[in-house]
Amino acid sequence: MKMKKVLRNLIFISLPSIFIFLLIFELFLRVGGWVYLWQRHPETYKKAMSYGQQNKFTILCLGDSFTEGAGTDRNNSYPKQLEKILLKNITGVNINIINGGRGGNSSSLLLKYLPVDLLRYNPDIVLIMIGCNNVWNFQDSSYFIINKKGGYLIQNLDSLLTNLRTYKMLKLAYFNTKAFLNTGLKKSHEDYNEFYEFAEAVDSMNADKRSKALTKSAVASSQDGNFDLALNQLQDALAIDGNNYIAHICMGNLWTGKKEFELARASRLQAIHMIHRWNQFLVTSMIAQIDRETEMDMVNKKEVLDELAVIKKAVEVSHKTNTGDNAIALIEAKINSIKDRSVIQKIIEYDLSRAIKIARNSGAQVVLETYPFRSFINIFREISERFSVPLVDNYAVFKKEQLSQYLFVPDGHCNAKGYGIIAENTYKTLIKYNLLPGNR
């Protein structure tokens, strides 16, 4: 009994003490921040203390490889091209564009890291284009939160606590430590170029050197938007060596862009029977073409599932390594997502809804971006209307664009011209809703 009484008294004494300590520490962080700013950066302090005189405007672009800039180099990603447009048209303001695109990112991962992204960058606007990787990337998926309602309470509490300096400091320390220990979270974008992945795939083939060289040139030409030249180069490459399966895959993508779907399917089927060593890159390239045809409403569900079954069988027969197993898992995830898209849609809807609320609590304006194709277009439009969030409808613009087949690279990502159209469309939408400094 004595021990229980001692413990009870200790708890009653400790809890108020801890609360008082945290309160004092919170005040210390707030006052200390202003003192540090006043002593070390007096000019910045004056601007921060002068209402209406802050001249920094930050736009945080979040998403996956379509935001990161896959298909071209970082200088031609849509965030970078948007930055160039803003610097050209807006003066007297320090424009700061953050490219937060992460290849393979899902809406759930975006939501997971959104609070720390908001803390690090303190953006005025958050642009979000996300969702297409949800069909295969279930890492930290909100599926489990949706099925266990307690997740709502946890995220609401997290959103409220983010207003405290102490909580922010602890959270930043946690994420920075985790990123340091796992460098995969801090993937560099600077030297990323989709061409190198194709170049490596070409080099690994047992094919004629001249045919390989022409295939590399064709990929580079397609990235530059020279699709007719790329088509001629691929035809020459196949004339030299008909077993050049990368050339067949690239040819399929070009035929898809030209809406010659039977020719595209024939090219893919030829490649399928030639590949002896499958990997995720080859499977993803195939799936990207099939996705684009699906988005154009040119194939039905049965045709898509039949072709995916053929690819899966080819992978199973020809390749039993871990890489092949990963490729099979990717195909199976795609097949499952086609059979039942409702689960994926619910996850995206939940993640976007939460992301909007969290960003608004931090004082940021959210703007949603659709993909340049039809994936999840209805969800984005519905969420935009429900939360009164501006929507950059890239799909509508690409659908009207008569030369849309010249705006993609062989794996289905945009090229520099395609990202330029997204950047221009984003700028027009921001102007339309009076979200930019100088036109509010």
Image (cartoon, rainbow, N blue to C red):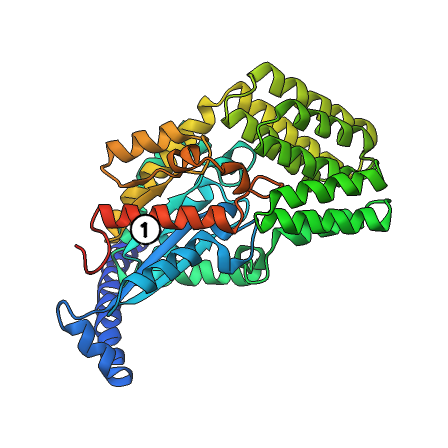
Q: 244 and 166: which one is in front? A: 244
Q: Residues within 10 Å of mark 1 (few under 14, many from 20)?
A: some
Nearer-the-camera pick, 362 or 292:
292
Apparent side of residue 84 relative to residue 192 in the rendered image (left or right): left
Q: Residue furthest bottom?
A: 39
Residue found at x 50% / y 60%: 75
Image quarter hosting the C terminus = bottom left
Q: Is residue 296 above or below residue 157?
A: above
Give the side of residue 7 with respect to residue 73, left or right: left
Residue furthest top in the image: 302
Farthest residue to the left: give it. 51
Q: Is residue 378 above or below residue 410?
A: above
Percent across and percent down for residue 115 are 36, 52
Q: Quadrant of residue 381?
A: top left
Residue at mark 1: 427
Of 253 and 214, nearer the camera is 214
The answer to whether one can see residue 112 in this image is no
Secondary structure under tag 1 reads helix
Under mark 1, the amino acid is Tyr
Image quadrant in which you'd find residue 269: top right
| Residue at 49 percent of width and 62 percent of height | 177
State the image coordinates of residue 94 (x, y, percent, origin top left): 29, 68
**Residue in view at x 46 percent, y 62 percent:** 176
Measuring 38% from the left and 56% from the top, which residue is drawn there?
82
Residue 114 % position (x, y): 38, 50
Tell me if 198 is positioned left or right of 102 in this view.
Answer: right
Q: Nearer the viewer, residue 193 or 183?
A: 193
Could you tell me if residue 66 is visible in this image?
yes
